[in-house]
C-alpha cells in the first residue's frame, strides 16, 4: 500500500519575535536546527520543503546540511497561515481574543492555502512510498495533527509545537493516518526546549 511518511517541523527559535518582522533565527534557533539535522542524518527524504519566512528557510538550510543530496524547495503552502476561520463562541476568553487578532484577509486566504497544503502534503501518494520533510509553522502542524486525529476543526487551537519539535504522520490509502510522533524534542537538551509562544510550556 503506497504511503507518505510526512515529517513536520516547526522552525527554530525566531530572533527578536517581538518585532513581528521576518527576522530569521536566533543563536538558540540555529542550535536547535543543527541538532535536529544531526538527528535526521541518513534519513532518506525525497525532499525538504519549507515556507518562505526566513525562520523556516534558515531552519531548513541547517537541517539539510545533514542531508546531502536531498533537494530543498521553498513552498508558499508551508507558510504561516490561519488554517481555519474558527468561531470563538464557546471558547475561553483568551482564545477568543487570539482569534479576534486575525485580519479579514488572513481569515479568507489562510484556510484556502492551508487546504492546498493539506492536499499536497497530507495524503497518500498515488504510487510508491515517499518520505518528505516540511519545515513550517505552528499552525500548519497543529492543523494536520488535528486532521489526522479527526478532531473538530477548532482543535487546531492549543496544539502548540516546540521550536524544532518533530511530528511525523503516515498517510496510506489503506486506512486512517497514523500519528507516529508528536512534538518530539528528544534531540534537544532541556535548555533548548521552548515554544516561544504565549502558552509556553516545557516537556
Ligand atoms: O502560532 C502562532 O501563534 C503563530 O502563527 C506563530 O507561528 P510560528 O512561531 O510557528 O511562526
Image (cartoon, grey):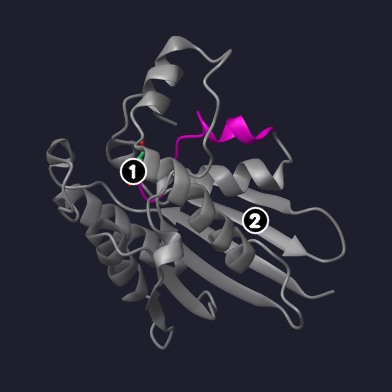
- Which of these two is toward me, 51 or 31? 51
Query: Which quadrant holds the C terminus?
Result: top left
Residue 6 occupies quadrant: bottom right
Q: Is residue 57 magenta?
A: no
Ligand 1 sits in quadrant: top left
Viewer-proximal residue, 188 or 74?
74
- In this rendering, the answer to whether 140 lies above or below 37 is above
**Image position, residue 178 (x, y; %):** 74, 52
Q: Which mark is residue 169?
A: 2
Residue 97 picture location, percent across and down:
38, 19
Instruction: Return the residue at label 1.
Output: 189
In the image as oriented, which residue stretches furthest toward the bottom?
A: 69
Q: Quadrant of the N terminus?
A: bottom right
The residue positioned 74% from the left and 40% from the top of the image is 150
Q: Residue at x 51, y 34 (%)?
A: 159
Q: Up-down: is 83 above or below 136?
A: above
Sequence-wise, the earlier of marks 2 and 1 is 2
The answer for how far apart the CA atoms under marks 2 and 1 are is 24 Å
* Magenta-drawn segment: 152-164
Whether the residues at callouts 2 and 1 have beta carbons within 8 Å, the answer is no
Whole-percent x, y for residue 171 in the image: 72, 62
**Relative to 139, is 59 above or below?**
below
At x 60%, y 49%, the residue is 144
Is any atom of residue 186 visible in this view?
no
The residue that appears at 55% across and 25% down in the rendered structure is: 87
Res. 174 in view = yes
Q: Is 160 contained in the magenta span?
A: yes
Amino acid at each position: 500500500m503506497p504511503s507518505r511518511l510526512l515529517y513536520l517541523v516547526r522552525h527554530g527559535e525566531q530572533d527578536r519575535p517581538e518585532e513581528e518582522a521576518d527576522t530569521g533565527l536566533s543563536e538558540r534557533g540555529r542550535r536547535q536546527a543543527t541538532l535536529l539535522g544531526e538527528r535526521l542524518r541518513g534519513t532518506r527524504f525525497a525532499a525538504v520543503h519549507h515556507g518562505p519566512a526566513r525562520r523556516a528557510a534558515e531552519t531548513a538550510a541547517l537541517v539539510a546540511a545533514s542531508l546531502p543530496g536531498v533537494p530543498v524547495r521553498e513552498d508558499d503552502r508551508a507558510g504561516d497561515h490561519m488554517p481555519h476561520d474558527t468561531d470563538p463562541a464557546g471558547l475561553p476568553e483568551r482564545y477568543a481574543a487570539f482569534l479576534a487578532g486575525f485580519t479579514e484577509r488572513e481569515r479568507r486566504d489562510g484556510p484556502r492555502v492551508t487546504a492546498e497544503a493539506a492536499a499536497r502534503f497530507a495524503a497518500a501518494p498515488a504510487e510508491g512510498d515517499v518520505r518528505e520533510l516540511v519545515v513550517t509553522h505552528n499552525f500548519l502542524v497543529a492543523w494536520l495533527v488535528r486532521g489526522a486525529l479527526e478532531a473538530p476543526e477548532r482543535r487546531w487551537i492549543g496544539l502548540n509545537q516546540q521550536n524544532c519539535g518533530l511530528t511525523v504522520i503516515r498517510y496510506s490509502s489503506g486506512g486512517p493516518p497514523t500519528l507516529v510522533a508528536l512534538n518530539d524534542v528528544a534531540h534537544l537538551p532541556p535548555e533548548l526546549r521552548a515554544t516561544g509562544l504565549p502558552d509556553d510550556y516545557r516537556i
